[in-house]
Image (cartoon, rainbow, N blue to C red):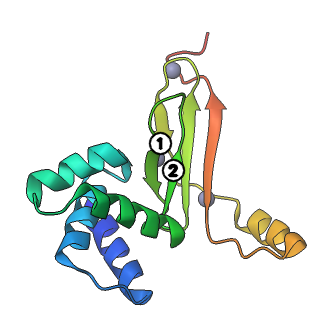
């Protein structure tokens, strides 16, 4: 999965005319290694381990860039730092347990039609979505 994520990210940047600098490669690789779930500080630390010359600001700027390109979204859970999640194929889905905070990833998606409908209604060019269902996981349901 992480190899696919990495090549997907590299390809997406190149298609949009961004150069794959050594710093960007290191950041994308760390992001893919993390399974596409990471805080900015965790990512900066992971990048620092393999590429000590890549500064924290470069990591933050790259996160911003990926966000602008619709490849990444911040998720806020509680009061902690934002978690960044990859929207590799334009979407990302979670089941979030409100009791134990477990997060389950799932791939099934039936939202393409809805995105098109609301996009048309509001003249909005939908580029991706992040979906979270909240509730109780199987360990936590009574
Ligand atoms: Zn639970
Ligand atoms: Zn996720
Ligand atoms: Zn979806």
Residue 70 seen: no
Ligand 2 has an atom within 8 Å of the beta carbon of the residue at disc 1: no
Query: What residue is at 31 percent from the left and 44 percent from the top?
Result: 41
Q: Quadrant of the N terminus?
A: bottom left
Residue 36's x, y, as percent? 37, 53
Residue 8's x, y, as percent? 36, 74
Residue 2's x, y, as percent? 28, 60
Classify 10 Å Cα crowding around label 1: few (below 14), some (14-19), many (20 and above): some
The kind of secondary structure element at disc 1 is loop
Query: What residue is at 61 percent from the left and 9 percent from the top?
Result: 142
Quarter assignment of residue 135: top right
The residue to which callout 1 is attached is: 82
Q: Residue furthest right?
A: 121
- Is 69 displayed left or right of 134 in the figure? left
Ligand 2 has an atom within 8 Å of the beta carbon of the residue at disc 2: no
Query: What residue is at 62 percent from the left and 42 percent from the top?
Result: 132
The residue to which callout 2 is attached is: 74
Q: In this view, does 4 lie above or below 123?
A: above
In front of the other: 25 or 108:
25
- Is 140 displayed left or right of 42 in the figure? right
In front of the other: 52 or 129:
52
- Is 51 displayed left or right of 128 in the figure? left
Quarter assignment of residue 96: top right
Q: In this view, does 139 lie above or below 31?
A: above
Quarter assignment of residue 39: top left
Task: Give yes or no for contact between labels 1 and 2 (Cβ–Cβ under 8 Å).
Answer: yes
Classify 10 Å Cα crowding around label 2: few (below 14), some (14-19), many (20 and above): some
Query: What residue is at 69 percent from the left and 71 percent from the top?
Result: 126
């Amino acid at each position: 999965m992480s190899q696919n994520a990495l090549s997907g990210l590299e390809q997406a940047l190149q298609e949009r005319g961004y150069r794959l600098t050594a710093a960007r490669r290191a950041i994308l690789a760390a992001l893919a290694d993390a399974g596409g779930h990471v805080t900015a500080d965790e990512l900066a630390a992971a990048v620092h381990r393999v590429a000590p010359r890549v500064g924290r600001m470069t990591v933050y700027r790259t996160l911003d860039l990926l966000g602008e390109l619709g490849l990444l979204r911040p998720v806020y859970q509680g009061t902690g730092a934002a978690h960044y999640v990859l929207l590799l194929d334009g979407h990302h889905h979670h089941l979030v347990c409100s009791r134990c905070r477990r997060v389950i990833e799932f791939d099934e998606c039936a939202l393409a039609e809805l995105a098109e409908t609301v996009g048309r209604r509001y003249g909005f060019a939908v580029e991706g979505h992040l979906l979270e269902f909240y509730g109780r996981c199987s360990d936590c349901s009574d």
